[in-house]
Image: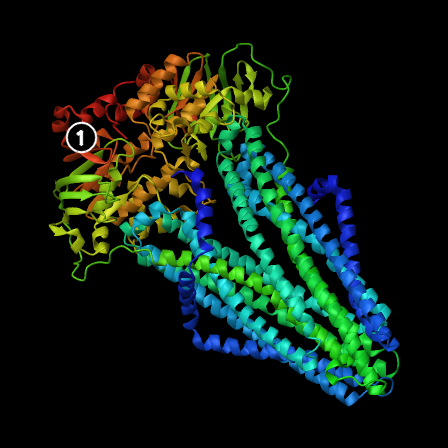
């Protein structure tokens, strides 16, 4: 909530003004039934038609004032919610992008997504609702009670007796309803999961003739969902008739007690009529207040989820050189006895040491889960090492400011992303790279040939995730992106797996010939992709089990030789 | 294909809903009503309960009028017997009305849930009958929104709007009748105000619709952008592009909040205005009512003689005011309900479109079941195109004996998978014939044909469930020993054992983080367990690193032994040993033969083969 108030702070006078206008409009509206009872009780007995008309016109004027005030206040509210939503979303998105990888792993991407979308939406709704109704409903309630108290305090008491009854029953029903709704939300999730899974795996399902099985499975989920939804809705169905009945019961009580009081000359019939009017207003306010409560619990929960992200403490700060002193030798990349673990249990990398001169190429090969990708992520400081240190140009990466560090890299990751936009846009990636350089990068990455075949060439629009191009084309565009800014260090994580050997070879040749100053780190499955590297690391379960050039490793490392023999002259087209 | 055009298309499509022909809309409505009519007795019961409960609720203010009239004579003169009677009656009426409306609500919930259940089941069952091509061309999200969001919309409208319309009609007609009975002359007020509200809400909602459409479109775009960028968050970070991306997000955010503001700015007027019109009628009613009440007093004191139609009692004024509130409410609601009905119709249309999608052609009555397959597969002059105008396979003939290996090679995206699609009869060929054991596959039941194959695909598919369930998916009732044996052959057993729950580990989207390679090994174990006479391997080991691949090699060979195999592969050893190699390029089979004969042709295969030695 602190975050919400912080965001609202600059608009506090505006909000104050809005609420004042709203209150005024509400008070004016409250006067209408008051005038009604005044006309019937006091004006009519004067037997003066002009007075009746005059007071009637008064009612119309009040109605008009209420109209104007409410419209103005509602519009002002919309302006406040517009500004706050925009700021909250901006802050949340900005913070989300700057979260460290470890923090993102903790939140998980789907959860961050829903915070950005549905939670900000809930907060927007909650803000607007509390500004529109938050004043009106309590004012109507309090004002209504005060006015009725001046009309007839005893009848007011009679009426107020039913209020706690309503509150209690609404509270009990919602308390029972909320867990039921949560349950049916879970059932809905599992129903949707089956549909999603089956749409994606339809080939396997049909191939194994499992359609009947899947239908039964779906039917089970469908039945469970129907059962849960029925239970939840049935519980909530009780609230409307119950509240209506209690309210009407109060009404009857007012009439009844009123009768006694009229009989004893303690009140007038007109007051009873006015009372019935106020009663409707007050009870509507009651319903409004309970609605605000239900909504605000949702809005507050969402705000908390947003604040969790925004207030996450920054990790991976730039540290001082006193703490992590630089090295004397100025080798381009140095890993000095690095160990690292994602969750602090088993080391995902242990005791990794190697160094590279500027312009050299490092090849990394090893089994699934051997730590190849982890190594590249430590180099880019997506995570901090557990032990040891990573140096670039002799400086510990922890002492290099993030901006400076990132600007050194050109990266293609596993399952890297293409976004909705033109080819040029995807290569440029918001870096304002001149078109010639983009073209040049595409040529180097062997992408130019197919891009030129698109009708709009570099202005060809790619779909989200690149679903309108092939895997090999995607990889070449990603490599173009990595090359476009002439990076100091190029990291290619299994980024040519979808290329056929011919293209892969041409790509390697062009990088070698044109980017002599660039230090390259290549993670690969294929020996042929790395066999010309200056240094090849063979990883197994987070440890280096072989390091050296292709020829040396063939001699010294059994596993490398095994991999190599299985592939050279063994692997073929893809 | 071109996404930049989608918003445009969307607008076109939604625009086409608006002037949707009356005829098609009524057809959709009729079909929706069909679901309701399956439960005729319940529907009738609901309607009766609704009628009674509304009439009772309507009668109550009339009773309160009587009660107040009984109080009116004043001090010491209150007619208590009448007051008690009417108050008791009011309680009874309200109570019965409340009970009825509760029963009604519960019945409606049950009824609508039954209908939703039926619609979902129909839709899902139909989905399983659709050809795989449907899933290739429709996004999963789209299918999900049909089965959840659209059906829910239809349902909400069925259970809420229809009842609401009936109830409102009863309320409007009823309160009108009541007001006439109290004072027909006072009613004339509504001659002014009712048309005012109707015209106003109609005018406003007409203007609001495009604003709301734009608002949900902009919000959708914003969400889409956020999701897209979050999925590439690591890349954004790697390039240090956080600022630029945030700026781009801000642009979309601004558009979204502005669209929101536009619609809120607009709707900010609606509530207060409707309120104003109500208050305005109240003022007129009070004014006239006051005057009529005055006439009533003057009449009774004999000071004046006015026609009785121009007089009213105090209780009458009170009841009239209450009815007038009841009367005004639904009139304003109608506009909302009608627009809700429109969106329900649109949703129903989308649901029906899926249900009406042509399913796979059903098996012919004469279709045989394929038993004891030996595994001879023949293709004779096969011709096929996904789109009949674009033929992909022109004239393919092939003979595979039992135990043969047929390798399909070619660059990515060349159409290798098409051949698999035809063998499994995911698609029907345009011309020629495919046979298994000499029988035309169109004369065989799909189930038995597909059961004759085991398939391992590049895209691993595992479902939410335990590893054990996932492995036994191809053969229900397999014992644990059999599963473990298959897992051992696929070299995944020790990994599975290392998981906290072993074979009972539940695979879920957010649960255990299991790598792509391990997933693929699980699908291989599944295939090993399934034990079908023919095998299709579509780059089955593409996600497995070469060392593991080598380790499972022996098992793969064992799996292939004696079975007719169709292999899409990049391993030369497999390809070299293949009995027939099909070389596919740009969707055409351009070369066919064994390794030696293809090498001697010095064609595309030859150049592919040699390219691996360049580096």
User: Looking at the image, which residue is at 45% across and 35% down?
Assistant: A420
Instruction: Please count the marks in the image.
Output: 1
User: Is residue A264 visible in this depiction of the protein?
Assistant: yes
Quarter in which the C terminus of chain A is drawn: top left
Please give the chain letter of the residue carrying mark 1: B
Dot 1 falls on a residue whose secondary structure is helix
Residue denoted by label 1? B576
Q: Using the image as rendered, state which of residue B267 and residue A333 is in the foreground.
A: B267
The residue most toward the top is: A329
Label 1: few (<14), some (14–19) or many (≥20) C-alpha neighbours in 10 Å: some
Q: Position of residue A564 (x, y in %)?
A: 29, 23
Q: Position of residue B50 (x, y in %)?
A: 56, 76
Quarter in which the N terminus of chain A is drawn: top right
Q: Position of residue B435 (x, y in %)?
A: 14, 48
Q: Position of residue B94 (x, y in %)?
A: 66, 78
- Lateral position of residue A101 relative to residue A64, left or right: left
User: Is residue A246 visible in this depiction of the protein?
Assistant: no
Up the image or down, B185 lies above or below A123; here it is: below
User: Looking at the image, which residue is at 79% across and 55% down?
Assistant: A24
- Lateral position of residue B119 relative to residue A69, left or right: left
Up the image or down, A20 lies above or below A379; here it is: below
The residue most toward the bottom is: B81
User: Looking at the image, which residue is at 56% across and 55% down?
Assistant: B206
Q: Using the image as rendered, state which of residue A437 and residue B242 is in the foreground.
A: A437
Which quadrant of the figure has residue A315? top right
Which quadrant of the figure has residue A254? bottom right
């Amino acid at each position: 909530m602190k975050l919400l108030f912080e965001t609202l702070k600059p608009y506090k006078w505006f909000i104050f003004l809005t609420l004042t206008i709203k209150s005024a409009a509400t008070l004016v509206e409250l006067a209408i039934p008051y005038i009604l009872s005044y006309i019937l009780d006091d004006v009519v007995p004067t037997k003066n038609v002009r007075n009746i008309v005059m007071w009637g016109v008064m009612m119309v004027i009040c109605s008009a004032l209420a109209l104007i005030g409410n419209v103005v206040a509602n519009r002002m509210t919309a302006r406040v919610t517009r500004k706050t939503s925009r700021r909250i979303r901006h802050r949340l998105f900005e913070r989300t992008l700057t979260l460290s990888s470890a923090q993102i792993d903790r939140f998980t991407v789907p959860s961050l997504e829903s915070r950005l979308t549905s939670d900000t939406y809930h907060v927007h709704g909650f803000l607007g609702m509390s500004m529109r109704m938050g004043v009106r409903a309590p004012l109507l309630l309090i004002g209504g009670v005060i006015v009725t108290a001046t009309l007839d305090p005893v009848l007011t008491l009679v009426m107020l007796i039913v209020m706690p009854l309503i509150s209690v029953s609404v509270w009990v029903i919602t308390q029972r309803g909320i867990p039921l709704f949560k349950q049916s939300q879970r059932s809905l999730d599992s129903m949707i999961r089956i549909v999603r899974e089956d749409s994606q795996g339809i080939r396997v399902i049909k191939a194994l003739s499992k359609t009947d099985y899947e239908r039964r499975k779906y039917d089970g989920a469908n039945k469970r969902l129907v059962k849960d939804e029925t239970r939840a809705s049935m519980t909530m169905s009780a609230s409307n008739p119950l509240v209506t009945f209690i309210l009407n019961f109060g009404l009857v009580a007012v009439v009844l007690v009123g009768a006694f009081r009229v009989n004893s000359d303690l009140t007038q019939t007109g007051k009873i009529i006015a009372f019935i009017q106020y009663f409707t207003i007050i009870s509507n306010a009651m319903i409004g207040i309970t609605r605000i409560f239900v909504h605000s619990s949702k809005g507050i929960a969402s705000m908390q989820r947003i604040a969790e992200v925004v207030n996450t403490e920054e990790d991976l700060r730039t540290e001082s050189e006193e703490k992590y002193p630089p090295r004397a030798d100025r080798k381009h990349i140095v890993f000095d006895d690095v160990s690292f673990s994602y969750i602090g249990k088993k080391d995902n990398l242990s005791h990794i040491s190697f160094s590279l001169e500027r312009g050299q190429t490092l090849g990394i090969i090893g089994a699934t889960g051997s730590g190849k990708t982890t190594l590249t992520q430590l180099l880019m400081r997506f995570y901090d090492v557990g032990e040891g240190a990573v140096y670039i140009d002799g400086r510990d990466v922890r002492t290099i400011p993030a901006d400076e560090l990132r600007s050194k890299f050109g990266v293609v990751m596993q399952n890297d992303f293409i976004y909705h936009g033109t080819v040029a846009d995807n290569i440029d990636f918001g870096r304002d790279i001149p078109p010639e350089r983009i073209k040049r990068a595409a040529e180097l990455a062997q992408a130019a040939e197919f891009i030129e075949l698109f009708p709009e060439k570099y202005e060809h629009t790619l779909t989200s995730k690149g679903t309108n191009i092939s895997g090999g084309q995607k990889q070449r565009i990603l490599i173009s992106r990595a090359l476009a800014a002439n990076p100091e260090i190029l990291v290619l994580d299994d980024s040519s797996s979808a290329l056929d050997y011919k293209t892969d070879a041409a790509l390697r040749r062009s990088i070698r010939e044109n980017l002599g100053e660039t230090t390259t780190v290549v993670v690969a499955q294929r020996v042929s992709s790395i066999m010309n590297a200056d240094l090849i690391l063979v990883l197994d379960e987070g440890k280096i089990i072989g390091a050296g050039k292709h020829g040396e490793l063939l001699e010294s490392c059994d596993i490398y030789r095994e991999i190599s023999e299985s592939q050279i002259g063994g692997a073929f087209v893809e | 294909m071109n996404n930049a055009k989608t918003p445009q298309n969307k607008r076109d499509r939604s625009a086409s809903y608006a002037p949707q022909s009356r005829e098609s809309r009524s057809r959709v409505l009729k079909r929706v009503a069909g679901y309701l009519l399956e439960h005729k007795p319940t529907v009738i019961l609901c309607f009766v309960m609704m009628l009674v409960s509304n009439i009772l609720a309507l009668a109550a203010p009339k009773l309160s009028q009587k009660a107040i009239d009984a109080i009116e004579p004043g001090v010491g003169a209150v007619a208590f017997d009448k007051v008690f009677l009417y108050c008791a009656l009011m309680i009874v009426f309200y109570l019965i009305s409340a009970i009825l409306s509760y029963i009604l609500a519960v019945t409606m919930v049950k009824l609508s849930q039954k209908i939703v259940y039926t619609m979902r089941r129909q839709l899902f069952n139909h989905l399983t009958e659709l050809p795989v091509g449907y899933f290739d061309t429709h996004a999963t999200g789209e299918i999900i929104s049909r089965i959840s969001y659209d059906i829910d919309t239809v349902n909400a409208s069925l259970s809420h709007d229809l009842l609401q319309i009936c109830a409102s009609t009863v309320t409007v007609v009823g309160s009108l009748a009541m007001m006439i009975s109290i004072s027909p002359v006072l009613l004339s007020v509504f001659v002014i105000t009712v048309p005012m509200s109707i015209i106003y809400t109609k005018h406003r909602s007409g203007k609001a619709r495009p604003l709301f459409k734009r608002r949900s479109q902009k919000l959708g775009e914003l969400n889409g952008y956020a999701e897209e960028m979050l999925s590439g968050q690591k890349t954004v970070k790697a390039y240090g592009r956080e600022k630029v991306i945030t700026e781009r997000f801000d642009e979309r955010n601004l558009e979204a909040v502005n669209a929101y503001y536009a619609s809120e700015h607009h709707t900010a007027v609606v509530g207060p205005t409707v309120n104003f019109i109500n208050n305005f009628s109240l003022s007129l009613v009070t004014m006239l009512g006051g005057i009529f009440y005055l006439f009533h007093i003057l009449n009774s004191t004999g000071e004046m003689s006015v026609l009785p139609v121009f007089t009213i009692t105090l209780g009458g004024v009170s009841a009239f005011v209450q009815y007038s509130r009841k009367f005004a409410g639904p009139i304003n609601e109608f506009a909302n309900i009608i627009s809700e009905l429109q969106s329900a119709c649109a949703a129903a249309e989308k649901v029906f479109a899926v249900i009406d999608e042509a399913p796979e052609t059903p098996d012919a009555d004469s279709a045989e079941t394929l038993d004891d397959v030996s595994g001879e597969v023949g293709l004779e002059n096969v011709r096929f195109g996904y789109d009949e105008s674009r033929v992909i396979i022109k004239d393919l003939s092939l003979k595979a004996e039992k135990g043969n290996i047929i390798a399909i090679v070619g660059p990515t995206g060349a159409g290798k998978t098409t051949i698999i699609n035809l063998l499994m009869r995911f698609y029907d060929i345009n011309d020629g014939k495919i046979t298994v054991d000499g029988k035309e596959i169109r004369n065989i039941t799909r189930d038995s044909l597909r059961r004759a194959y085991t398939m391992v695909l590049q895209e691993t598919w595992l479902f939410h469930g335990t590893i054990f369930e996932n492995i036994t998916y191809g053969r229900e009732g397999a014992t644990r020993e059999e599963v473990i044996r298959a897992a051992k052959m696929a070299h995944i057993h020790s990994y599975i054992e290392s998981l906290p729950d072993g074979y009972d580990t539940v695979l879920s989207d957010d649960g255990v983080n299991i790598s792509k390679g391990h997933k693929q090994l699980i699908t291989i174990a599944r295939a090993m367990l399934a034990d079908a006479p023919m095998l299709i391997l579509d780059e089955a080991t593409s996600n497995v690193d070469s060392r593991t691949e080598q380790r499972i090699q022996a098992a793969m060979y064992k799996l292939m032994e004696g079975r007719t195999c169709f292999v899409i592969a990049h391993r030369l050893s497999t390809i070299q040993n293949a009995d027939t190699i099909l070389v596919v390029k740009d969707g055409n089979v351009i070369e066919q033969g064994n390794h030696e004969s293809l090498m001697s042709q010095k064609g595309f295969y030859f150049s592919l083969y040699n390219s691996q030695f360049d580096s």
